[in-house]
Amino acid sequence: MNKVEAKATARRMKGQLKETVGHVMGDRHMRAAGRNEKVKGKIQLAVERTKKTLKH
């Protein structure tokens, strides 16, 4: 795992946490922000892994 993949994983985990906290608190905006962050992390991770695969 390289630096970019680690950041993407951290972003995904942060989004998951934010989504969960939003759900517990009943805050729709926080849940949406968490989902958004989580998806960005997943996309970033997929792009990085694709680049890594195509490089080899």
Image (spheres, grey):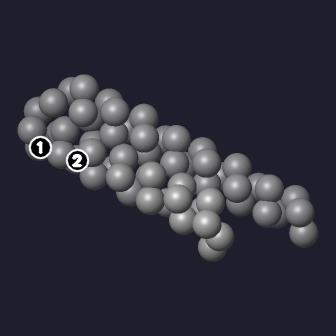
Q: Which residue is mark 2?
A: 20
At which x and y percent is residue 32?
32, 30
- Determine which quarter of the picture holds residue 50: bottom right
Q: Residue at x 26, y 35 (%)?
A: 31
Q: Residue furthest top?
A: 29
Q: Which residue is mark 1?
A: 24
Q: CA distance from mark 1 to mark 2?
A: 6 Å
Q: Residue at x 9, y 38 (%)?
A: 25
At which x and y percent is residue 54?
87, 59
Q: Is 9 above or below relative to 40?
A: below
Q: Secondary structure at mark 2?
A: helix
Q: Secondary structure at mark 1?
A: helix
Q: Residue furthest bottom?
A: 1
Q: Residue at x 22, y 47 (%)?
A: 20
| Residue type beneath disc 2 | Thr
At which x and y percent is residue 56?
90, 69
Left/right placement of residue 49 relative to residue 33 reads right
- Determine which quarter of the picture holds residue 4: bottom right
Q: Residue at x 42, y 35 (%)?
A: 36
